Image (spheres, helix red, strand yellow):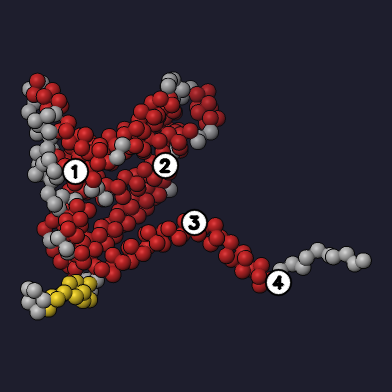
Amino acid sequence: MTSLGPPAPPPPARRRARRTLAPFAFLAPFLIPFVLFTLVPIGYAFWQSLHKTARTGGTFGHTRSVFAGFEQYTDVVREPFFADSILRVGLFALVQIPVMLAFALVLALLLDSAVARLKRFFRLVYFVPYGIPGVVAALMWAFLYDPRLSPITGLLKTAGVSADLLSPGLVLWSIGNVVTWTYTGYNMLILYSALQALPADIEEAARVDGAGGWTVALRIKLPLIRPALVLTGVFSIIGTLQLFTEPQVFRSISTSVTSTYTPTIAAYSLTAGDSYNEAAALSVLLAVVTFVLSFAFLRFTTRRQG
């Protein structure tokens, strides 16, 4: 009776093919949705932005899509609302992002301190606003801002301050308050997770050397969680340039928010007016601006760290 030996190893070419395809097999659950729901829509938007609608036969003639090159981009950039909306969002980012991240950092440091109590409770309380849908949060704050219903306006009047929080000069910062209230807890959780990942030996050594609580927080913990701060900064820049829900809800209660108040609202308004190609061009430009600003922020922070 003959005994069967061990199975013969696969040919070298087959082994190399397996090693080559193995990473793609592990990445497939990410790559497939990323290609279908990110790259394909971006490519289609770019293709749409290179075309325009031409009408033949007068007002009631047929319409067809023709290649226009970068004509749509030129038209969008020349629109007065383009520069206004970009500058408005830029001003919003310069003020709101530092304020929000400062609040998130303070809350994370307080939760991470040795004297903090009920950490699970307060961590949940700080994170709850992020769990509320954006439309619901905007409607709730819109009620608080309405001069006819707002208890805040009543309290200000009793203090001798008359302020219309939905006026053209204040509505941007009213929206900023909503965004800060919503996303501070989200950023706090990222920073708190980074603080929890720090080795306990570092803080113990600093305590032995006589460092106080503020010194440990500012001189030791803060530099060590710099990557988490950079991450929250990038997320905030991207989210600010995509500002849509809050101002869109405020449009229904305030004339201060126009149909071109932010770039995303302007793109939505162009789409509602059947200007799909121009809206696609604006969307592509916004994506480019987002990429450039995020990349510049990363380069700046990396250089400062080096």
Asked whether the residues under the numbered discs 3 and 2 touch, taking CB atoms below 8 Å apart as contact, a structural biologist would say: no
- The residue that disc 1 covers is 249
Judged from the image, the secondary structure of the residue bearing numbered disc 4 is loop
Q: Earlier in the sequence, mark 1 or mark 3?
A: 3
Q: Position of residue 210 (x, y in %)?
A: 48, 22
- The residue that disc 2 covers is 228
Q: How many marks?
A: 4
Judged from the image, the secondary structure of the residue bearing numbered disc 1 is helix
Left or right of residue 19: residue 28 = left
- The residue that disc 3 covers is 29
Q: Is residue 38 above or below residue 232?
A: below
- Using the image, tell me which numbered label, if any, was put on residue 290: none
Amino acid on which the number 2 mark rests in the picture: Ala
Judged from the image, the secondary structure of the residue bearing numbered disc 3 is helix
At 29% from the left edge and 55% from the top edge, which residue is drawn?
290
Q: Earlier in the sequence, mark 1 or mark 4?
A: 4
- The residue that disc 4 covers is 11
Judged from the image, the secondary structure of the residue bearing numbered disc 2 is helix
Q: Earlier in the sequence, mark 2 or mark 4?
A: 4
Q: Earlier in the sequence, mark 3 or mark 2?
A: 3
Instruction: Answer with the quarter of the image where residue 189 lies.
Output: top left
